[in-house]
Image (tube, helix red, strand yellow):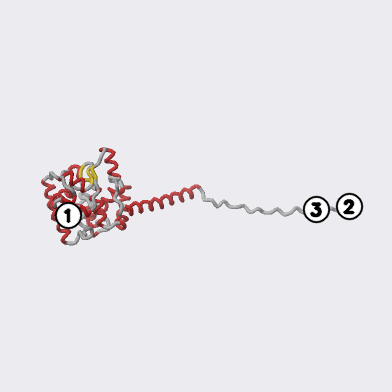
């Protein structure tokens, strides 16, 4: 009997197993985090850049004060419509080296450290960042954001714009923001009609306006106002006001 040849079974085709190339949950989460950070940075840069031309309608601190007080006294006025000595007085009082630094006054910071932290070293640029974009307080997250936004603002804005925004968002009394409202509140005049002494008085009550009265300066504040008036004349004469003067 003839042997029947065994049929060889066809070779099984090896099916290549496809590797799952989709990223894992952790990688997808990180990707979304990086995207959120990227677009967050872009939004902040555009926000800061927009305020170079757009007058801030309100600030975070103004909003909190409006919620607390119910109403604010604030009216924007361009720097061209302020008496010129007002800007010089504010710079002389708060940041005499304003035109020479890029947002941080290293010399003032060093002197503040040597004095044991008993004196401030915050520049006008830092105060604008704090007032226009951030919240009040001394928390480390706010300080970190301020440290990042200050040089960004300095890079995107001219110095004249920094002074203009500062004089329009600074607080001069409880619920009173900006030089225009302050000039009317204390002296019954517009910012364009302030005298040299009145401008120095307004600058001298910064940065603690809630406990000071520009129309009734204490003897100590009168002495400060005289120094501010002299300082405003000095920075005009030596060129330290050139970056924000016409």
Residue picked out by circle 3: 6
Q: Is 185 or 135 nearer to us in this picture?
A: 185
Q: Is residue 175 above or below residue 195?
A: above
Labels 3 and 2 touching (C-beta < 8 A): no
Q: Is 195 or 166 nearer to us in this picture?
A: 195
**In the figure, is residue 147 to the left or right of 108?**
right
Residue picked out by circle 2: 1
Callout 1 secondary element: helix
Badge 2: residue crowd in 10 Å (few <14, some 14–19, many ≥20) = few
Badge 3: residue crowd in 10 Å (few <14, some 14–19, many ≥20) = few
User: Residue 151, percent across and down?
Assistant: 30, 56
Which residue does the image show at 12% across and 52% down from the upper left? 226
User: Residue 23, percent across and down?
Assistant: 52, 50
* Residue 114 visible from this viewpoint: no
Labels 1 and 3 touching (C-beta < 8 A): no
Q: Earlier in the sequence, mark 2 or mark 1?
A: 2
* Residue 63 visible from this viewpoint: yes
The disc placed on residue 85 is: 1
Q: CA distance from mark 2 to mark 1?
A: 125 Å
Query: Foreground mark, 1 or 3?
Result: 1
User: Residue 115, percent across and down?
Assistant: 20, 52
Residue 235 lies in what quarter of the image?
A: bottom left
């Amino acid at each position: 009997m003839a042997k029947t040849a065994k049929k060889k079974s066809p070779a099984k085709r090896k099916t290549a197993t496809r590797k799952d190339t989709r990223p894992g949950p952790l990688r997808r989460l990180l990707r979304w985090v990086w995207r959120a950070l990227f677009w967050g940075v872009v939004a902040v840069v555009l926000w800061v850049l927009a305020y170079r031309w757009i007058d801030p309608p309100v600030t975070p601190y103004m909003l909190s004060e409006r919620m607390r007080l119910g109403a604010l006294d604030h009216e924007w006025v361009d720097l061209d419509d302020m008496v010129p000595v007002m800007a010089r007085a504010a710079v002389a009082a708060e940041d005499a080296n304003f035109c020479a630094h890029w947002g941080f006054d290293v010399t003032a910071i060093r002197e503040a450290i040597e004095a044991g932290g008993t004196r401030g070293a915050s520049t006008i640029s830092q105060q604008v960042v704090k007032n226009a974009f951030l919240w009040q307080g001394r928390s480390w997250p706010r300080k970190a954001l301020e440290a990042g936004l200050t040089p960004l603002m300095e890079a995107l804005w001219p110095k004249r714009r920094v002074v203009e925004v500062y004089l329009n968002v600074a607080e001069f009394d409880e619920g009173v923001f900006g030089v225009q409202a302050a000039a009317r509140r204390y002296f019954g005049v517009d910012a364009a009609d302030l005298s040299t002494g009145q401008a120095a008085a307004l600058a001298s009550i910064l940065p603690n306006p809630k406990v000071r009265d520009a129309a009734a300066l204490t003897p100590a504040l009168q002495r400060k106002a005289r120094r501010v008036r002299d300082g405003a004349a000095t920075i005009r004469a030596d060129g330290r006001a050139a970056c924000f003067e016409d």
